[in-house]
């Protein structure tokens, strides 16, 4: 084995040959250049991209959240509008129901009154007709009957008429049976 | 003389002694000529193409290949490969660069990342086949990186503050009474311009050198004792020493990582102090 004679005045503290020092320096400079030109830029570029991606992601998330909040507000607004509308419709329906009811009642009352009035008129007419015919028939029949019973002609018309009238009046005062 | 040399542990007779020849580089294409006086005449290939220099080149190639692979076709959602790359990248980028330098740290990330990975890979060569030798236990490499770091922080400091202001900033601390500056200014100068690179280089080198030495002693010495003939106590001690070497290996893995990290952190720290206002 051939060894380099390397024992200088400082022993191992001083290299006997400059080759190690020079080669070490050159190698290190080469390494630093590669790091500087290639490796570190690659890492830093990737870090920047990552930071951008994270920032972008956060922005997207924020935007999505804002969108969701806006949509929620919109829905709530719409819902409130719908509720209002429904309440309005209900009120309206209630109102119109009441109105219809009232109208119907009025109509029915009118109808009833009209029917009652008709009936009354009719009854009154029939009654007066009946009274009239009675007055005619009952008078003469009674006179005849009485004449037969009494055997005398009731010639005195005035007295006869008076008697008949008082009889009919008494009939009038009795209630009409329906 | 009857020498038994095992991995640099020189065993002379029954008293093992040690020289640092285990750390000597080995020319890949030996062509040295021995002169009559016993000295060697090395050719340039002996000196420039050694096993340890090849290791450094392979280490650099591994670092570059690793980063090109993990950073290939990066996506926002990382693959496992990319995730691992990001994990290591962030230790240096955020844990060292951003923590130590603060604003404007990004332009130093290539330097710090390269420094950390280059040192780490070469340190871990000491624990893994096929090399089993930490490159930075050769001090030339450590000095090279220390000098580069020294140039870096002084360069960025001078560029930001101007030469005069930078020298003033680095030698004259705030709030020191004028007479004391006679003492303080030279000390600050030595501390900031001489001690820093020297300690950087020696710290890295010495940790790896000592670690590898320990491994050698436990493994080679253990093997030597284990195979000693007719001495059971030696054999037991040798076995124990070989077992211990596993713990030393684990420790060296940690030391290799720590030294790479410390070198990187200190570089960032020096850059930060050179850039800072005041002081």
Image (tube, coloured by chain):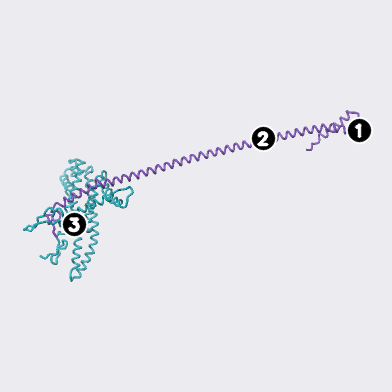
Q: Is A145 situated left or right of B20 in this image?
A: right
Q: What's the distance in space between the residues labelled 2 and 1, CA to CA?
A: 58 Å
Q: Nearer the viewer, mark 3 or mark 2?
A: 2
Q: Is residue B223 visible?
A: yes
Picture disc at residue B209:
3
Residue A38 percent across, percent down from the top left: 25, 46
Q: Which residue is mark 2?
A: A107
Compared across the picture, whether B143 is left or right of A144 comes to left
**Residue B127 appears at what percent x and percent y?**
23, 58
Circle 1 sits on which residue? A147
Left or right placement of residue A146 versus residue B65 in this view: right
Q: Is residue B12 above or below residue A112?
A: below
Q: Which chain is purple?
A: A
As drawn, the label of residue A111 is none
Badge 3: residue crowd in 10 Å (few <14, some 14–19, many ≥20): many
- Label 2: which secondary element: helix
Q: Colour of chain B?
A: cyan
Chain under disc 2: A
């Amino acid at each position: 084995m051939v060894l380099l004679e390397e024992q200088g005045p400082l022993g191992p503290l001083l290299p006997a040959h400059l080759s190690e020092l020079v080669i070490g320096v050159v190698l290190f400079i080469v390494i630093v250049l590669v790091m500087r030109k290639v490796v570190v830029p690659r890492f830093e570029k990737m870090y920047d991209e990552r930071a951008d991606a994270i920032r972008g992601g956060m922005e997207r998330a924020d935007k999505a959240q804002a969108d969701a909040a806006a949509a929620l507000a919109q829905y709530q607004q719409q819902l409130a509008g719908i509720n209002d509308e429904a309440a309005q419709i209900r009120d309206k329906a209630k109102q119109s129901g009441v109105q219809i009811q009232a109208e119907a009642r009025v109509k029915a009352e009118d109808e009833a009154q009209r029917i009652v009035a008709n009936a009354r008129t009719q009854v009154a007419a029939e009654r007066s007709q009946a009274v009239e015919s009675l007055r005619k028939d009952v008078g003469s029949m009674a006179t005849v009957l009485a004449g037969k019973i009494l055997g005398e002609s009731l010639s005195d018309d005035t007295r006869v008429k008076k008697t008949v009238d008082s009889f009919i009046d008494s009939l009038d005062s009795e209630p009409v049976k329906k | 003389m009857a020498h038994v040399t095992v991995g640099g542990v020189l065993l002379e007779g029954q008293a093992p002694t040690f020289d640092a020849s285990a750390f000597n580089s080995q020319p890949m294409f030996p062509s040295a000529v021995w002169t009559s006086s016993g000295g060697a005449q090395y050719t340039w290939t002996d000196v420039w193409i050694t096993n340890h220099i090849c290791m450094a080149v392979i280490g650099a190639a591994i670092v570059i290949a690793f980063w090109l692979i993990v950073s290939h076709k990066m996506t926002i959602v990382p693959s496992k490969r990319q995730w691992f790359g990001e994990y290591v990248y962030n230790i240096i980028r955020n844990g060292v660069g951003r923590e130590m330098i603060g604003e404007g740290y990004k332009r130093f990330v290539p330097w710090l990342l390269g420094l950390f990975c280059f040192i780490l890979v070469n340190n871990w060569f000491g624990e893994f086949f096929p090399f089993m030798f930490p490159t930075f236990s050769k001090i030339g490499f450590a000095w090279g990186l220390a000098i580069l770091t020294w140039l870096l922080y002084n360069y960025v400091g001078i560029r930001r503050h101007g030469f005069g202001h930078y020298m003033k900033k680095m030698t004259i601390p705030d709030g020191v009474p004028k007479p004391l500056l006679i003492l303080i200014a030279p000390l600050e100068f030595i501390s900031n311009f001489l001690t820093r690179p020297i300690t950087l280089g020696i710290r890295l080198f010495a940790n790896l050198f000592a670690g590898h030495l320990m491994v050698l002693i436990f493994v080679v010495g253990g093997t030597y004792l284990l195979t000693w003939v007719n001495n059971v106590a030696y054999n037991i001690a040798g076995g124990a020493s070989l077992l211990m070497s596993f713990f030393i290996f684990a420790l060296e893995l940690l030391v290799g990582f720590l030294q790479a990290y410390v070198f990187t952190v200190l570089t960032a720290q020096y850059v930060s102090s050179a850039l800072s206002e005041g002081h």
